[in-house]
């Protein structure tokens, strides 16, 4: 019998993990506050700005973050997806986000960005108005409000449900410990792969990216009313 060596590899660096669980908590809070309405809308706005900053952070982190969090590491090519579905993908295409997972990440982030952007221009014509709703024409305000409340919201909820079902499928049927990897960062592999750097230097870099992201959000908001 051959002996299979196992390697424990850091896949998700701490900043990526904090990003993920903060995002999940913020999106949950956004859905709840939107449904309560009224005074809870103050929190809907605050959490929306938080998601705005998180998205900016994740964008930067895709360039300077740990190996497996980088944009260049996402196997997004159609050939990668086809190979994955046929069970022929390389280990490195399954270590971080696999090809389907990569598309799911990009789709989630794009629709989150659309949701935040349209929120800034939305107006419910009762009590709540996004900070830029008074800076554009009524056409854009109604389009943004329509997307934010009728379209984007439903697409996002569907994507989140799909996301959780996919993760559950991988845990139960394929025995892949994806949730614990997003919690403590490590995955076990039969091949020795490049780990994501996750030391002190990376964390200072993350703090810097986060401060820049918050600053951008504050500057953008200062242009609104
Ligand atoms: C209980 C709820 C959730 C669980 C258990 C969960 C679990 C996970 C796991 C395990 C991954 C890594 C997947 C992989 O290995 O490729 C992941 C990635 C991701 N999830 Fe979730 N997730 C949850 C909620 C959410 C929510 C609410 C959102 C946002 C709408 C979200 C957005 C993302 C994104 C953007 C990534 C990619 C992470 C990155 O590369 O930065 N997740 N999630």
Image: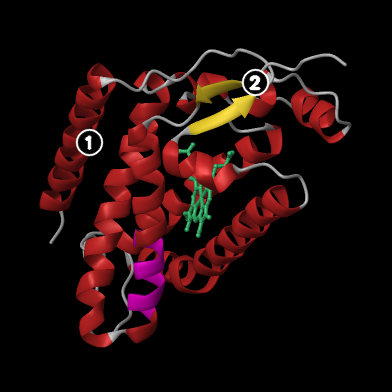
17 and 79: which one is in front?
17
Residue tagged by mark 1? 210
Q: Which span of residues is magenta-colored?
A: 26-34
> Is 29 part of what is drawn in magenta?
yes
Q: Secondary structure at mark 1?
A: helix
Q: Is residue 196 visible?
A: yes
Which quadrant holds the C terminus? bottom left
Classed neighbour count for the residue bearing mark 2: other residues with Cα under 10 Å, few (<14), some (14–19), many (≥20): few
Q: Residue 17, how many percent across, how many down?
A: 39, 40
Q: Which residue is mark 2?
A: 6
| In this rendering, position of residue 137 left or right of residue 139 | left
Compared to residue 27, the image places residue 74 above or below, namely above
- Asked whether 106 falls inside the magenta stretch, the response is no
Q: Is mark 2 within 8 Å of ligand 1?
A: no
**Picture colour scheme:** secondary structure
Q: Main secondary structure of the magenta part?
A: helix
Residue 128 in view:
no
Identified at 68% across, 23% down, the residue is 93
Residue that extends furthest to the front in the rendered view of this protein: 1
Residue 218's place in the image compared with 13, above or below, is below
């Amino acid at each position: 019998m051959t002996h299979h060596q196992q390697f424990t590899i850091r896949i998700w660096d701490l900043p990526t993990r904090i990003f993920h669980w903060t995002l999940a908590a913020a999106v949950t809070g956004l859905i709840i506050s939107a449904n309560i309405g009224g005074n809870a809308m103050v929190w809907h706005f605050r959490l929306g700005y938080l998601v705005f900053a998180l998205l900016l952070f994740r964008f930067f982190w895709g360039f300077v973050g740990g190996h497996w969090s980088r944009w260049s590491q996402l196997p997004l090519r159609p050939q990668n997806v086809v190979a994955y579905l046929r069970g022929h993908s390389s280990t490195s295409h399954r270590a971080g986000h696999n090809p389907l997972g990569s598309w799911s990440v990009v789709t989630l982030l794009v629709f989150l960005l659309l949701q935040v952007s349209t929120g800034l221009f939305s107006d419910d014509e009762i009590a709540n108005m996004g900070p830029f709703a008074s800076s554009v024409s009524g056409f854009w305000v109604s389009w943004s409000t329509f997307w934010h409340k009728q379209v984007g919201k439903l697409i996002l909820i569907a994507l989140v449900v799909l996301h959780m079902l996919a993760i559950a499928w991988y845990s139960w049927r394929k025995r892949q410990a994806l949730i614990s990897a997003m919690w403590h960062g490590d995955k076990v592999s039969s091949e020795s792969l490049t780990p994501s750097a996750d030391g002190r230097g990376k964390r200072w870099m993350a703090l810097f990216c986060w401060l820049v992201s918050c600053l951008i959000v504050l500057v953008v908001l200062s242009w609104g009313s």
